[in-house]
């Protein structure tokens, strides 16, 4: 089985989002591991096992590469590496579901969603995770859920964990593309996000392809 634990211990004692550290009581340390706020110690490992059952083997390899790169990006940018890691583990939980299931879990918000149900797998993943008990009742849960939901369209402002997962997803080494964005993110996450989103929107608009409203929202938030 692929690696199941983060490679390095957390170095920060709080969740830093947008440069603001959360109170230290949001985190607790046990035996070299991390209890995320409001979550039982075995719960995260349980989710990893469930994700592995939900996706194809090659997808799971991608998921673990995203988790590890998101962790590295977070570490390099003063964000919580373990939170980024676990958001990465969860990000594609709905990616291999059939279209009908995606449409059921995430009813279309626009014509693009209806025409391309695969684009719904971020929102569908959030719905699925809520059924597993990840409801967004704590700061940590909310940051992870937003990262899962937004990874297909672009991170919303203020969630650095979501930016880590988004960039890791588009640039993990297995993709074979976007190495420049990966390298940039490892020392300047905002610059990498700007490059990734602007190049995506420019590419689509240059070919007359409609841009998802959520991606446009992220794009305008960066300008
Ligand atoms: Fe995805
Ligand atoms: Fe992915």
Image (spheres, rainbow, N blue to C red):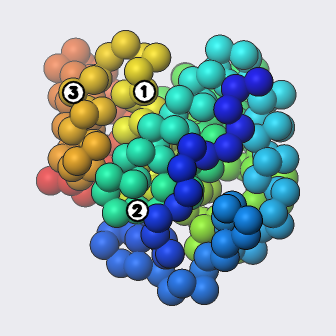
Instruction: Report the residue marked by disc 1.
Output: 172
Check residue 107 in the rendering and tell me which mark sits there, or answer none: none
Report if residue 51 is visible in the image: yes
Secondary structure, mark 2, is: loop
At 25% across and 57% down in the image, what residue appears? 221
Compared with 156, 16 (above or below) is below
Q: Is residue 131 depicted above or below 10 in this figure? A: above
Callout 3 secondary element: helix
Badge 1 residue CB within 8 Å of ligand 2: yes
Residue that numbered label 2 is attached to = 79
Q: Position of residue 3 (x, y in %)?
A: 67, 32
Residue linked to disc 3 = 180
Q: Nearer the viewer, residue 210 or 41?
A: 41
Q: Is residue 197 above or below residue 138?
A: above
C-alpha distance separating marks 3 and 1: 11 Å
- Which mark sits nearer the N-terminus, 2 or 3? 2
3D distance between C-alphas at marks 2 and 3: 21 Å
């Amino acid at each position: 089985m692929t690696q199941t634990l983060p490679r390095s211990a957390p170095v920060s004692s709080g969740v830093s989002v947008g440069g603001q550290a959360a109170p230290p009581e949001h985190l607790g340390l046990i035996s070299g591991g991390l209890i995320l706020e409001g979550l039982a110690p075995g719960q995260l490992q349980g989710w990893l096992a469930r994700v592995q059952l939900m996706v194809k083997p090659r997808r799971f390899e991608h998921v673990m590469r995203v988790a590890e790169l998101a962790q590295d990006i977070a570490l390099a940018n003063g964000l919580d590496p373990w939170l980024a890691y676990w958001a990465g583990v969860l990000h594609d939980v709905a990616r291999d579901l059939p279209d009908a299931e995606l449409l059921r879990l995430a009813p279309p918000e626009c014509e693009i969603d209806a025409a391309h149900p695969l684009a719904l797998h971020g929102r569908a993943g959030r719905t699925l995770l809520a059924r597993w008990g990840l409801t967004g009742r704590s700061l940590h849960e909310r940051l992870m859920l937003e990262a899962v939901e937004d990874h297909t369209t672009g991170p919303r402002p203020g969630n650095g964990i979501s930016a880590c997962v988004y960039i890791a997803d588009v640039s993990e080494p297995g993709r074979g593309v976007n190495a420049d964005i990966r390298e940039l993110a490892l020392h300047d996450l905002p610059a990498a996000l700007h490059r990734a989103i602007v190049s995506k929107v420019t590419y689509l608009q240059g070919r007359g392809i409609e841009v998802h409203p959520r991606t446009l929202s992220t794009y305008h938030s960066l300008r």
